[in-house]
């Protein structure tokens, strides 16, 4: 199992942990399937009224799709089989509140998860970045999710700058991507405190409020995501060229933290 779930019946809070620390909690096909299964299971868990989502260890919350994943693609430029498209709670019809507790790096496909969380509690040591353009890939789904959570210019800068820059936790807090900062040792307790507050309220009212908040932006989100497959098909370099760029990443200068 690569997704660990711990439930506290007394508080009504479940902690969902990406448990691939040695791979920086990157998501392979098995992990993607487990995440979808966990969210759908939690829909029926009467003893769970709020969820904290985090990653094992301190190095990374999640670094997106595992580079070892191979997904055969259709020849049509209008179709893309994305292994991460259904890993988020909203994609699986879970309307219980989800708080992301971000430790270390959060990049690339991590934004599928952050984009479908209600809010983010971040370690002060965390960093946020999107490596797609550096490796010849279109940031479509990720950029769309972040454009809904960040000022447009900040989302554009992060999506376009690739690995040249990383957004610090402090800057992420200043622009509203992150709602609370915590020391690394206090990250999970801070997220659990917030989740405990949510779980202590009548769950019908909380879930209704979550649904109302998402309805305010869901139409625009669906329209934007609908264009993602074609943009990815048209703009991505061939896989072998992407691999060359990824292999050569060690020669690149250290990213600037801002």
Image (cartoon, rainbow, N blue to C red):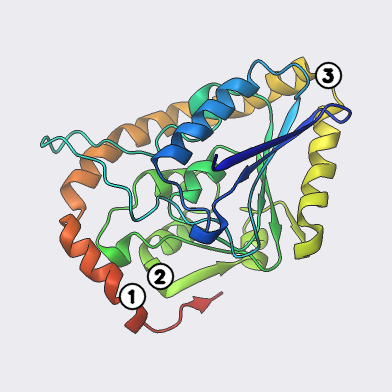
| In front of the other: 119 or 152 | 119
Please tell me how crowded label 2 is: few (under 14), some (14-19), or many (20+) other residues with Cα within 10 Å. Answer: many
Q: Which of marks 2 and 3 is nearer the N terminus?
A: 2
Q: Which of marks 3 and 1 is nearer the N terminus?
A: 3
Q: Which of marks 1 and 2 is nearer the N terminus?
A: 2
Foreground: disc 1 or disc 2: 1
Cα distance between the residues tagged 1 and 2? 9 Å
Q: Residues within 10 Å of mark 1 (few under 14, many from 20)?
A: few
Which residue of the protein is positioned furthest toward the front in this rendering?
Answer: 1
Please give the name of the residue rendered at 66% of the width and 62% of the height, measured from the top-left corner: 174
- Image quarter of the C terminus: bottom right
The answer to which image quadrant residue 119 occupies is top right
- The residue at which mark 1 appears reads as 249
In x, y percent, where is residue 93? Answer: 54, 21
Helix, strand or loop status at disc 3: loop
Numbered badge on residue 62:
none
> Which residue position holds label 3?
202
**Which quadrant, please, contains the N terminus?**
top right
Vertical comparison of 153 with 72: above or below:
below
10 Å crowding of disc 3: few (<14), some (14-19), many (20+): few
Please report the residue visible at 57 percent of the width from the left and 57 percent of the height from the top.
21
- Residue name at image x 47 percent, y 40 percent: 31
Return the mark for residue 163. Answer: 2
Q: Is residue 221 left or right of residue 75?
A: right
């Amino acid at each position: 199992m690569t997704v660990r779930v711990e439930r506290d019946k007394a508080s009504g809070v479940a902690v969902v942990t990406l448990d691939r620390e040695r791979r920086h909690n990157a998501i392979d096909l098995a992990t993607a399937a487990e995440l979808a299964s966990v969210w759908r299971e939690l829909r029926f868990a009467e003893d769970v009224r709020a969820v904290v989502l985090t990653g094992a260890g301190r190095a990374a919350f999640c670094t997106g799709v595992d580079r070892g994943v191979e997904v055969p693609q259709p020849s049509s430029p209008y179709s893309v089989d994305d292994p991460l498209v259904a890993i988020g709670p909203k994609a699986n019809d879970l309307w219980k509140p989800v708080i992301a507790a971000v430790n270390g790096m959060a990049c690339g496909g991590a934004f599928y998860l952050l984009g479908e969380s209600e809010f983010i509690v971040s370690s002060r040591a965390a960093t946020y970045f999107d490596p797609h353009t550096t490796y010849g890939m279109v940031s479509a789904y990720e950029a769309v999710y972040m454009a809904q959570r960040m000022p447009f210019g900040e989302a554009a800068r992060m999506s376009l700058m690739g690995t040249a820059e990383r957004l610090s936790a402090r800057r992420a807090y200043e622009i509203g991507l992150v709602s609370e900062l915590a020391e690394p040792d206090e990250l999970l307790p801070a997220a659990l405190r917030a989740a405990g507050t949510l779980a202590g309220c009548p769950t019908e009212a909380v879930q209704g409020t979550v649904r109302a908040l998402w309805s305010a932006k869901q139409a625009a989100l669906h329209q934007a995501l609908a264009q993602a497959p074609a943009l990815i098909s048209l703009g991505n370099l061939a896989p072998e060229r992407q691999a060359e760029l990824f292999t050569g990443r060690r020669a690149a200068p250290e990213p600037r933290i801002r």
